[in-house]
Image: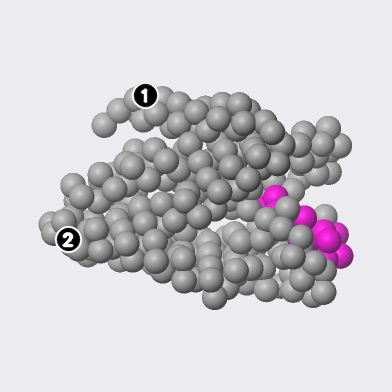
Amino acid sequence: MLASLVGVFFTIKFLSDWTKKNIRYLLAFASGVFTIVSYNLVNEALELGTNTFFVWMAIICGFLIFLIVERFYPDIHCHHDNQKCLSKNLNGGAKKILIGDAFHNIGDGVLLAPIFVANIKLGLMVAFGILIHEIVQEISEFFVLKNAGYSTKKALTLNFLTSSTILIGAIGGFYLSSLKYLIGPFVGFTAGVFIYILLADLVPKSIRHSRQEKKYFNYIVWTIFGIFLILSVNFLVGN
């Protein structure tokens, strides 16, 4: 929910300029974070699951369901460099983005709660990964709303309200996690979603941007930084 207020950066000129120049590097950083978090999620799911086959099926289902959702509803992720998406929203489609994001945040809440029940340390790591991805997403949505004619105050308010739907998902996910036999598959499903975001969104975009800008080293450094940071957090927190 706090990530939805990132648009405040654009009310301060030097922060706005810095963010616009470096948002693409944040994708590479998120790639590193998601790589380690996805690996940890798979391991945790296999440890919690009583049936390895069902856990792997949950991982595959998480990947495929998110793939299908994005194919049928591509506007659920509208990035600031996606001119096709931005142009559609100039013609009154901004509300569609907000509705899609509200449902997306409910899904985040449903996925997060069982992971915290299973393992608080892993829950914090997953929450951090989602936070990084949400920052990029919320910056993009702020651009969409501003381009659609919304004032800064209204854009921030609407982003915050739609992000608050994560609480609905978290409450639902918490009650679902009371069914202990579902925790393993739930964690596996989340792993599948993270792997999809990593392979279909973060990595391809980072590679494309690095090729366009010819700054391969910068993107590699940011990816390694993401990996190193999440490994450091994992080490410091311990079991």
In this picture, is 98 found above or below 127? Answer: below
Provide residue 121's location: percent of width, then percent of height: 34, 38
Confirm whether the magenta stretch covers residue 143: yes
**Would you say residue 215 is visible in this rendering?**
yes
Determine the secondary structure under disc 2. Answer: helix
In this picture, is 167 found above or below 9? Answer: below
Tag 2: amino acid: Phe
Provide residue 140's location: percent of width, then percent of height: 70, 54
Q: Closer to the observer: label 2 or label 1?
A: 2
Residue corresponding to mark 1: 236
Q: State the residue in front, 163 or 16.
A: 16
Q: Residues within 10 Å of mark 2 (few under 14, many from 20)?
A: few
Determine the secondary structure under disc 1. Answer: helix
**Would you say residue 156 is visible in this rendering?**
no
Which disc is residue 53 wearing? 2
The secondary structure that most of the magenta stretch takes on is: helix
Q: Is residue 179 left or right of residue 235?
A: left
Provide residue 118's location: percent of width, then percent of height: 27, 49
Tag 1: amino acid: Leu
Q: Which residues are magenta?
A: 138-151
Residue beneath the point at 46% across and 66% down: 67
Residue beneath the point at 60% across and 69% down: 74
Which disc is residue 17 wearing? none
Residue beneath the point at 70% across and 41% down: 212
Mark earlier in primary sequence (2, 1): 2
